[in-house]
Amino acid sequence: MDMPIPESIKILVTFFHPALMWVLLALTIYALYLGIKVRKSRTATDTKKKK
């Protein structure tokens, strides 16, 4: 079963896939940032938590 992919879809996929990968990378880095922030707040002393 060999179904050809229309040319218009090929153009959209070649743009959409890299854009999606960049968005996923940005979300991963943001999740890392939030995780580091949470760890700092959990391990901080009382005087540092008030700041």
Image (cartoon, helix red, strand yellow):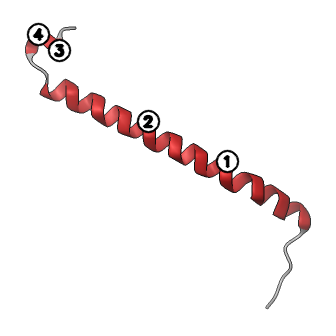
Q: CA distance from mark 1 to mark 2?
A: 17 Å
Residue bearing mark 4: 47
Which element carries disc 4, helix, strand or loop?
Answer: helix
Residue bearing mark 2: 30
Q: CA distance from mark 1 to mark 3?
A: 38 Å
Amino acid on which disc 1 is placed: Ala
Q: Are marks 4 and 3 in contact (CB under 8 Å)?
A: yes
Which element carries disc 2, helix, strand or loop?
Answer: helix
- Report which quarter residue 17 is drawn in: bottom right
- Quadrant where the N terminus sits is bottom right
Binning the other alpha carbons within 10 Å of mark 3 as few (below 14), some (14 to 19) or many (20 upward) gives few
What residue is rendered at 83% in x and 64% in y? Answer: 10
Residue bearing mark 1: 19
What residue is rendered at 58% in x and 44% in y? Answer: 23
Q: Is residue 3 above or below residue 47?
A: below
**Residue 49: numbered disc:** 3
Residue 36 at x, y = what percent?
28, 33
Which element carries disc 3, helix, strand or loop?
Answer: helix
Residue 27 at x, y = what percent?
49, 41
Earlier in the chain: of badge 3 and badge 2, it is: 2
- Quadrant where the C terminus sits is top left
